[in-house]
Amino acid sequence: MSSQPSSGDLHDLRRHIDEIDRAILRLIGERRNCSFQIGEAKKTGGVPALRDAAREFEILTRLSHEGLERGIPPTLTQSVFGALISDSLARQEQDILRSSETIGRNTPKRTGFLTRDGLWGEQAAAQCASFHEKTLSNNVTQQPVSNSQSILQWASLAEATQALHKGNAELLVLPIEHSNLGTLRESMIAIIDAGLRVVREVRVPVALALMAPTGVTLNQIRRLYGSELAFRLCSSLLETLGSVSQEIASFVGEERIRPLQGEDEISSNDWAIVAPEHLAITSGLTVIAPSVSDFPQTTLRFFACALTPEPITNQLSYATSLLAGSQQASGSLSSILDIFRRRNIVLTKLESLGTLRGEVVYQRMSSAGSLNPSIKSQALRGYSEGPHDEFFYIECLGAETLSPLSEALSELSAIGALVEILGSYPKMSQPPQPGVVWEKQ
């Protein structure tokens, strides 16, 4: 590295900054490579858990104190090294997951989405396809496969389920939760109807814009296209547009825009669409108004579903989604929650699904073949005594086949609760928590 330049020479100072930045990048690269080797050692050495919270705490606390001695505030030190540790954990977790999925596979997993979910479904499917293509590309005998060959689109749940059963696809992504609107129950019911298992979660940013052919103004719009969810998120825009005709369309890719652009000249300048802004770049439309959603900076969470669960390893952290049904009786919900509390299982979501008749939900589960056989007899005995009128959607930390959640599920069945597991899926680690370091004033 060059010697310190004079303080008065701005050009030399900036060149020196550039040299420092390159040195930092080189060291980050070296750190990531070393972290990868640590991950390989954990994988081959059978380390029970990838994450060592005590080690993370020690690193961030020690470096924060060392940074203070160099005049660096703890917040900056913890931000930088916290991001590096998170990156290392994410790479190690993904590598473990990919290794378990490449066994016996010669082709990437084909992932599909429903037309009704529009561009968000396409993005979620693309994320899953990208993950699995990277999985196989790690094998030198495999050739990378483009996303377009791995992403499928289905018009209905029945069509998607048929494709899964025929082996024409392995995964279906369904939106399960909007960060402002909450759980999308129709997707939850769809998972049960089709007898699917949740194996992955994907988050897609939701950003909407109003766009139209070049030259079209707000006052000229007579027809507005968009997905059902897009219209739900843009009530203020719809009020502004007044009596504009609203037509449901998913606009998946340019092929859905082209027919509108090919209409006769008289009617081709009276329509607009509400969709993610990046569609304007690929379709040649002009953005009239950006950020038209009533809920800016939100995300849509998807579940990637398969016909069978994927292997669970004790080296990764998991979350599990399930339905729990109980009778309308005093203390029935508290009895369910107490089982999780006594076993120190963290609940991340609890939502009432209303007073659905237990028989209806049971028949749906049973006809789909998704009811856990180990609890079927217990559930039937419960119905002979009375209906399960209260249903709750629960998300918790842990895997259904690993302790302590496996014991908790057995105990739920023993007290007569109707339990339906939607699936266990990897829950990637959160950033490490730093120690408290006081900065001298």
Image (cartoon, grey):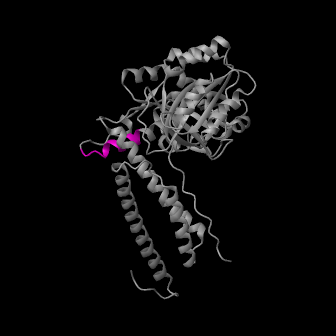
Residue at the image point whose x is 31% and y is 46% from the top: 138
Q: Splitting the image into 4 quarters, where does residue 298 fall?
A: top right
Q: Main secondary structure of the magenta part?
A: helix
- Where residue 123 appears, as percent x and y from the top left, is 49, 39
Q: Decide if residue 212 is on the left or right side of residue 306.
A: right
Is residue 262 or residue 200 the one in the foreground? Answer: 200
Q: Is residue 138 magenta?
A: yes
Q: Decide if residue 34 is on the left or right side of residue 160.
A: left
Q: Is residue 285 visible?
A: no
Q: Decide if residue 359 is on the left or right side of residue 36.
A: right
- Where residue 126 appears, as percent x and y from the top left, is 44, 39
- Where residue 54 appears, as percent x and y from the top left, is 52, 58
The residue range painted magenta reads 129-140
Question: In the picture shown, does residue 272 fall above or below 41?
Answer: above
Q: Quadrant of the N terminus?
A: bottom left
- Where residue 143 appears, as percent x and y from the top left, is 27, 42
